[in-house]
Image: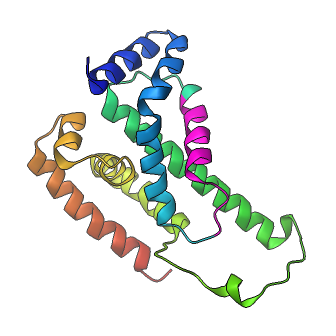
Amino acid sequence: MDSRAQVTQILQSIAHGDEARWDDLVPIVYEELKQIARARLAQLRPGQTYNATALVNEAYLRLSGAETDWKGRAHFFGAAARAMRNVLVDELRSKQARKRGGDWNRVVLDESAARTDGPSFDLLALDEALHRLEKSDPQQHEVVMLRYFAGLSIDETARALDVAPATVDRHWSFARVWLHREMTREP
């Protein structure tokens, strides 16, 4: 049995109450989850608390505690991507609360601390924009979660959502433009 079918079978067992199957799922999905985590972390500003392994472990803990009727592999990876996003957003909010006086520490900065390397974006702005998109168009939100956060292709996303690939492509194109506009507009 290939790993895709095996993941779906295990998820169905979990959905029917066989919690012990979480242990069977880990070795099959762990590396793929780490790839998703690495891709997300690479887009953030330097200085994140989490590395890919820690992010996957935290997201996995959140998923394993959730009672969900898993609809298959794509549904699981979409939920895993959402859990990773939530972990990162929670961490960022916590850091910002501490920055505003919740946890004062005196820090001496040198020039190297002022440099930023690589791409970055505002995760909180993205999270807020995604919440607005979810309210206005849940299907486009799901397309973004599966395409961007879970790393699924157009065809895989179409299968997961049970829609035509052209529909996914259209939603993906619109959602990217909409999110960009939402994140770059003046407050």
104 relative position to 66: left or right: right
Q: Looking at the image, what colour scheme do you see?
A: rainbow
User: Which residue is drawn at the image coordinates 52% and 71% (left, top)?
Assistant: 122
Residue farthest bottom in this picture: 111
Q: Residue 103: x and y, percent? A: 87, 64
User: Which residue is drawn at the image coordinates 27% and 70% (left, top)?
Assistant: 177
* Magenta stretch secondary structure, dominant: helix
User: Which residue is drawn at the image coordinates 10% and 42% (left, top)?
Assistant: 164
Q: Residue 56: x and y, percent? A: 55, 42
Q: Residue 115: x and y, percent? A: 62, 85
Q: Residue 105: x and y, percent? A: 89, 71
- Tell which of 114 and 128 is nearer to you: 114
State yes or no: residue 186 in magenta: no
State yes or no: residue 53 in magenta: yes
User: Which residue is drawn at the image coordinates 42% and 28% (left, top)?
Assistant: 28
Q: Is residue 51 above or below residue 26?
A: below
54 relative position to 164: left or right: right
148 relative position to 49: left or right: left
- Tell which of 30 and 80 is nearer to you: 30
Q: Is residue 85 above or below residue 100?
A: above
Q: Which residues are magenta?
A: 47-63
Q: Is residue 132 above or below residue 34?
A: below
Quadrant placement of the N terminus: top left
Q: Is residue 59 above or below residue 182?
A: above
Q: What is the total number of numbered labels drawn onto the structure image?
A: 0
The image quadrant of residue 64 is top right
